[in-house]
Image: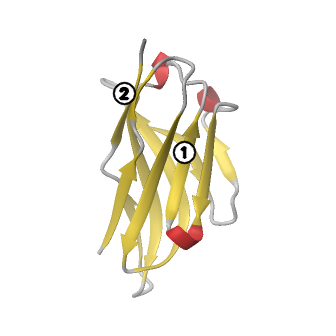
Amino acid sequence: QVQLVESGGGLVEPGGSLRLSCAASGSISSIGDMNWYRQAPGQQRELVAGITRSDVTTYVRSVKGRFTISRDNAKNTVYLQMDGLKPEDTAVYYCWMDVTTMLSISYQYWGQGTQVTVSS
């Protein structure tokens, strides 16, 4: 059994910063890709940023230059540093990981979601 626990969301004024964290625990052998998604009310969930095990990163165009994804493989944790936040970044943010378990089986897991609200 593997669990992903997110933290770091909250309310911030436009132009402010937040750092999201997502830690995986359980029967983990290794973790491949790690992603952050977000879903605003009435909208589809979208991929915000992704990072491979070799630290290759991708970003949706709307956050490039403002958000930074990183990972700590020793801690099975992925981070999302969000700077220059805008009201349109308001959403529930979810982490996602491709986990290989101790039984050498690969599963994909989601975090529980954390609310990010950007408002004055």
| Residue depicted at 31% across the width and 25% down the height | 41
Residue 42 showing in the rendered view: yes
Amino acid under disc 2: Ala
When the figure is inspected, residue 65 is found, relative to residue 70, above or below; the finding is above
Work out whether mark 2 precedes mark 1 in sequence or the reverse, and give the earlier one.
2
| Residue depicted at 62% across the width and 53% down the height | 70
| Residue depicted at 51% across the width and 17% down the height | 14
Task: Indicate the position of residue 53 as horizontal and vertical percent values.
Answer: 63, 66
Counting other residues with Cα less than 10 Å from the Cα at mark 1, is it few (<14), some (14-19), or many (20 or more)? many
Image quadrant holding the C terminus, namely: top left
Image quadrant holding the N terminus, namely: bottom left
Toward the viewer: 80 or 42? Answer: 80
Task: Indicate the position of residue 51 as horizontal and vertical percent values.
Answer: 61, 55
Per the model, the C-alpha gap separating discs 2 and 1 is 17 Å
Residue under circle 2? 40
Farthest top residue in view? 120
When the figure is inspected, residue 69 is found, relative to residue 90, above or below; the finding is below
Q: Quadrant of residue 116?
A: top left
Residue 45 showing in the rendered view: no
Counting other residues with Cα less than 10 Å from the Cα at mark 2, is it few (<14), some (14-19), or many (20 or more)? some
Mark number displayed over residue 80: 1
- State left or right for residue 17 relative to residue 114: right
Marks 2 and 1 close (CB-CB < 8 Å): no
